[in-house]
Image (cartoon, rainbow, N blue to C red):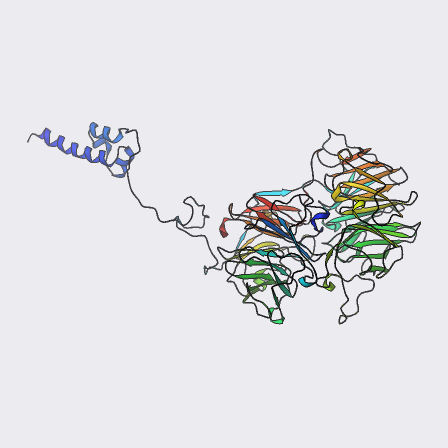
């Protein structure tokens, strides 16, 4: 367990990403407007390896992030913008790219990067947008997955499985302590428009109440879900998408 | 040619053919040869064990992409060459999969974020932030070491209670009303009557800013103080406020030294309020183009100034009881000698001028003097393996009985000490709600998850 003053963590952290190539994991501290990077085996009251924080970072309310270990970049959504930093950035570092502008139609708090297909997938509150990985400035998304068939009310954590081109999204539903219609959904990176998820893990057998986090264990063909209402981690066998 | 020779020759040929093709009766069956028609020699040839495997047929398998024994779903074709779907496929049909998880990581025991005692009824209230509710015990309950847990005498929990990530608790000593503060998923404080039980609706609700944490009541002036973690603020309400009532005072601003505020305590004798801070902070500014802001409502993270975030040391900030706006603290307790480490709940002993702090990440309780300032060392520290403290976040001072109550989120228990306890002291009593050596899983409001395949570890932020 990593906790304590030296960690520079807060009691509220809405994302975590493991970089398998460099054996590091990254966490957001939204209250301190910081991105905190730890070594893979960090434990206890351990200091981070690097911290991105300061006036030049443009970080406002960094709730979530993703790391691209192939192109060595960290991507942080921030409502009307996406900020991109070098993976090894430390201190008061300006972003190397900013995706922002009215044509982007960004209204996002979460994203996932696909370093193989060179895409960024982000949520818009009621759907998802897909950009080219290196997009910057005021550019339109190349695709939008939105509409009643999607079943999306809001999305928390996003993941991408690049070998098959799947987007995996945790959909915790609307307001309320146990909202209806929650699910973990899988879309294609080639989807566009009012498209239902290819798979939707949901229902009474699933046990989920409010899924907010998702990640894949490729080796064991499993989907791991963090459920906020249950304060639990659920692991499903999900070979269909591998 | 004699008939006998012709007949023998025919059967010898059949026997040789059968022996070449296989020795098993099954092979004969595949070849559609009636074993009864064979000579005994021919039959012997088929069934003769050779001591090693024999090739009996060849049927080439199709090429397989991936592991030979790769599992395929039942919907796959019989051919092992069937591929799992990919995003490139044109099939866009949607499937709902209602399948049970293989494994579940979940703590089924309560974890206690706060504690309060009703001195009228001699009952202890323990705030359960894991299972969302609170449990009530007798003040003198003491779980024997060999007992699995102590059964509560009643509990309040369920969807109707609107409790979720309930992190602070206040019990009105006059009426017995129970005030429960929700943190960052439900923007409502709920109030229950003294003998509430079960899955019941609150008798009163107050819609609060997002991310409230600590609560303190000023019974002299009938006011309620709440810390707002997300906005670095303190809001003050009339004690009986409900619904959409506005706060009567707001403390927020660059000069306040509110930095991820958690616990709060009111000293009505000196007219001070004390706040613990974890140190994460950013600036906020009103939007000049926005419609007028709500009265005494904190500016939220939408108004955060980009790039203004800082990670400051933990601290205790002290204000006048009626401080408003961007008021600087009267003094600040901060520095390495304080040993503050994610300080949570606060309680003030007005008779002894002492300030108790639940020091979460240090597994300790620190006791300061209420007049301390700067890099002040605590006057007393309760810490050590005998204390039973494990991530303590809740405190209650029972000055009537001379006792200090502490709730620990790390080990499913509340412990009781003398008010002047110091050092590695065993508690006078323990109320435990899980087996003796059980530690809490510490999963709380998991908003994300990651996986480390090197170590085969699941990473969960809370």
| Quadrant position of the N terminus of chain B in the picture | top left
Please state which of residues B88 and A95 is positioned toward the viewer in this rendering.
Answer: A95
Question: Residue A102 in the image: x percent, y percent?
Answer: 63, 71
Task: In the rendered view, tell whether residue B267 sits above or below residue B295.
Answer: above
Question: Residue B350 in the image: x percent, y percent?
Answer: 91, 45
Query: Disc count in the image?
Result: 0
Residue B277, can we see it?
yes
Please state which of residues A160 and B60 is positioned toward the viewer in this rendering.
Answer: A160
Task: In the rendered view, tell whether residue A194 sits above or below residue B385.
Answer: below
Task: In the rendered view, tell whether residue A179 sits above or below residue B389.
Answer: below
Q: Residue furthest left?
A: B1
Q: Is residue B440 left or right of residue B238?
A: left
Residue B197, can we see it?
no
Question: Residue B396 in the image: x percent, y percent?
Answer: 84, 43
Question: Residue A68 in the image: x percent, y percent?
Answer: 56, 56
Residue at the image position 86 percent from the left and 56 percent from the top: B329
Residue at the image position 19 percent from the left and 29 percent from the top: B39
Q: Is residue A121 left or right of residue B180?
A: left
Q: Is residue B111 left or right of residue B37?
A: right
């Amino acid at each position: 367990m990593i906790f304590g003053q030296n960690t520079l963590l807060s009691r509220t952290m809405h994302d975590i990403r493991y970089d398998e190539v460099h054996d590091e994991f990254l966490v957001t501290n939204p209250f301190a407007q910081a991105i905190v990077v730890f070594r893979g085996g960090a434990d206890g009251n351990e200091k981070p390896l690097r911290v991105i924080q300061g006036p030049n970072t443009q970080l406002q309310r960094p709730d979530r992030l993703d790391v691209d270990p192939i192109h060595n970049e960290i991507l942080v959504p921030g409502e009307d913008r996406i900020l991109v930093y070098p993976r090894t950035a430390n201190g008061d570092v300006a972003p190397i790219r900013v995706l922002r502008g009215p044509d982007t139609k960004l209204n996002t708090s979460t994203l996932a990067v696909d370093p193989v297909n060179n895409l960024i997938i982000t949520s818009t509150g009621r759907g998802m947008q897909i950009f080219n990985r290196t997009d910057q400035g005021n550019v339109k998304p190349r695709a939008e997955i939105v509409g009643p068939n999607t079943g999306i009310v809001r999305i928390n954590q996003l993941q991408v499985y690049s070998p098959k081109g799947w987007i995996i999204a945790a959909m915790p539903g609307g307001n309320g302590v146990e909202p209806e219609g929650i699910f973990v959904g899988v879309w294609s990176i080639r989807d566009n428009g009012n498209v239902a998820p290819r798979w939707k893990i949901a229902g009474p057998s699933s046990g989920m109440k409010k899924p907010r986090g998702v990640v894949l264990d490729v080796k064991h063909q499993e989907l791991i879900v963090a459920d906020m209402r249950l304060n639990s981690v659920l692991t499903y066998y999900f070979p269909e998408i591998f | 040619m004699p008939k006998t020779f012709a007949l023998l020759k025919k059967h010898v040929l059949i026997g040789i053919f059968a022996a070449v093709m296989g020795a098993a009766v099954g092979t004969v069956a595949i070849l559609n040869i009636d074993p009864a028609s064979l000579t005994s020699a021919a039959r012997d040839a088929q069934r003769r064990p050779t001591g090693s495997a024999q090739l009996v047929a060849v049927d080439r398998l199709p090429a397989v992409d991936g592991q030979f024994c790769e599992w395929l779903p039942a919907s796959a074709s019989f051919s092992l060459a069937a591929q799992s779907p990919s995003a490139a496929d044109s099939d866009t049909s949607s499937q709902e999969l209602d399948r049970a998880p293989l494994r579940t990581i979940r703590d089924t025991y309560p974890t206690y974020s706060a504690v309060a005692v009703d001195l009228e009824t001699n009952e202890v209230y323990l705030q359960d932030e894991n299972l969302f509710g609170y449990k009530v015990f007798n003040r003198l309950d003491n779980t024997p070491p060999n007992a699995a847990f102590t059964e509560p005498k009643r509990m309040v929990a369920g969807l109707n209670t609107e409790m979720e990530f309930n992190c602070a608790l206040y019990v009105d000593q006059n009426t017995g009303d129970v005030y429960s503060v929700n943190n960052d998923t439900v923007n409502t404080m709920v109030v229950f009557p003294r003998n509430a039980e079960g899955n019941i609706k609150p008798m009163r609700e107050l819609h609060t800013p997002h991310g409230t944490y600590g609560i303190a009541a000023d019974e002299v002036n009938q006011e309620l103080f709440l810390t707002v973690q997300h906005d670095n603020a303190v809001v003050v309400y009339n004690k009986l406020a409900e619904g959409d009532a506005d706060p009567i005072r707001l403390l927020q601003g660059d000069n306040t030294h509110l930095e991820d505020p958690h616990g709060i305590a009111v000293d009505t004798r000196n007219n001070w309020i004390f706040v613990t801070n974890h140190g994460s902070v950013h600036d906020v500014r009103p939007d000049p183009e926005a419609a007028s802001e709500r009265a005494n409502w904190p500016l939220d993270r939408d108004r955060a100034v980009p790039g203004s975030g800082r990670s400051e040391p933990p601290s205790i900030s002290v204000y006048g009881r009626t401080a408003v706006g961007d008021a600087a603290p009267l003094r600040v307790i901060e520095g390495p000698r304080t040993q503050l480490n994610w300080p949570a709940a606060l309680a003030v002993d007005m008779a002894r001028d002492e300030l108790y702090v639940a020091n979460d990440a240090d597994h300790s309780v620190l006791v300061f003097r209420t007049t301390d300032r700067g890099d002040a060392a605590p006057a007393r520290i309760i810490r050590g393996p005998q204390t039973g403290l494990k991530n303590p976040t809740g405190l209650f001072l029972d000055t009537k009985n001379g006792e200090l109550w502490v709730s620990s989120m790390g080990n499913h228990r509340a412990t009781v000490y003398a008010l002047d306890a110091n050092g590695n002291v065993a508690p006078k009593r323990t109320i435990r709600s899980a087996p003796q050596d059980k530690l809490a899983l510490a999963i709380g409001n998991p908003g994300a998850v990651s996986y480390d395949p090197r170590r085969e570890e699941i990473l969960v932020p809370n």
